[in-house]
Image: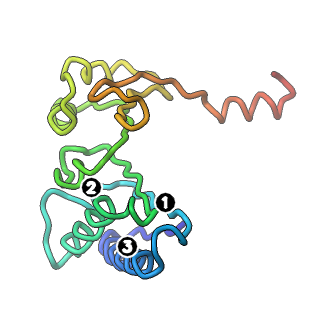
Amino acid sequence: MIYLPEPDDARLATSQFIMSLLALKKSMGANRSRRVLLILDEAQEFIPDRVRSEDFTDMSNRAVEALLRHGRKYRAHCWLSTQRVAHLNVSALHQLHSYFVSVLPRSYDRWVIAEAFSLNTALLDRTIELETGEWPFVSYKATRQKNIPTFIKAPNNEDILASRLLGQK
C-alpha cells in the first residue's frame, strides 16, 4: 500500500509504477507471472477527462489506460474507486468489465454512468435510495447479462466484528 497525499507526486509515482509493471510483465510472460491488483482510490486524480503535462495527469492517464486496456493479458488488474465519475477519462471507463455503483447524488454522474455502460437512467436514479452496503453490480463476464445490473447487499463487517467481540452472534 502506498499513500501519497500530494496529487502530483501520486500521479507521477503511479504512472512510473504502472509502466514498469507492464514492462516487467511483458518481458516475463503472462503465464509465469503472478497476478497483480492495483487499486486506485479517487480515480479522477489519475484518469481525469482533462489532462495537463505540468501536473502529470497526462502521464498517469496514459499509464492507467494502458493498464486497463492491456493488463488483463499479463495478469495485471486494476480497481478504480471514485465519487466523481463525470470527471473520468471516458476511454478508460470503456475498458471496465465489472463495476459497482454506489449512491450517486449528482444527476450528471448518473447520466455519465448510464451513457458509458448503456444503462437505464431511471434505474440509476434508484441509487439515491440505496442503504450502506447496497450496490447495483454490472458485469457481463460474471452474470452473463449485458447491461443489466444485479442489486446486491453486503453485510457490514464492522457490525459483525463488534458483535463477535462482545460475544453476541
Q: Residues within 10 Å of mark 1 (few under 14, many from 20)?
A: few
Question: Alpha-carbon neighbours of circle 2 within 10 Å: few (<14), some, or many (≥20)?
Answer: many
**Mark toward the viewer: 1 or 2:** 1
State the residue at coordinates (24%, 49%).
Answer: 93
Q: CA distance from mark 3 to mark 1?
A: 11 Å
Read off the residue under disc 1: 37
Q: Position of residue 85 (x, y in %)?
A: 24, 44
Q: Quadrant of the N terminus?
A: bottom right
User: SS for tag 2?
Assistant: helix
Marker disc for residue 44: 2
Pointer 1 or 2: first along the chain? 1
**Who comes first in sequence, dot 3 or dot 2?**
3
Q: Is residue 36 above or below residue 168?
A: below
For the residues labelled 3 and 2, say whether their Cβ atoms are less than 8 Å apart: no
Of tags 3 and 2, the one toward the viewer is 3
Question: Quadrant where the C terminus lies?
Answer: top right
In the drawing, does residue 155 fall left or right of residue 79? Answer: right
37 displayed left or right of 121 = right
Q: Quadrant of residue 107?
A: top left
Disc 3 residue type? Ile
Kind of element beneath mark 1: strand
Q: Residues within 10 Å of mark 3 (few under 14, many from 20)?
A: many
Q: Secondary structure at mark 3?
A: helix
Q: Which mark is residue 18?
A: 3
The kind of residue tagged 2 is Gln
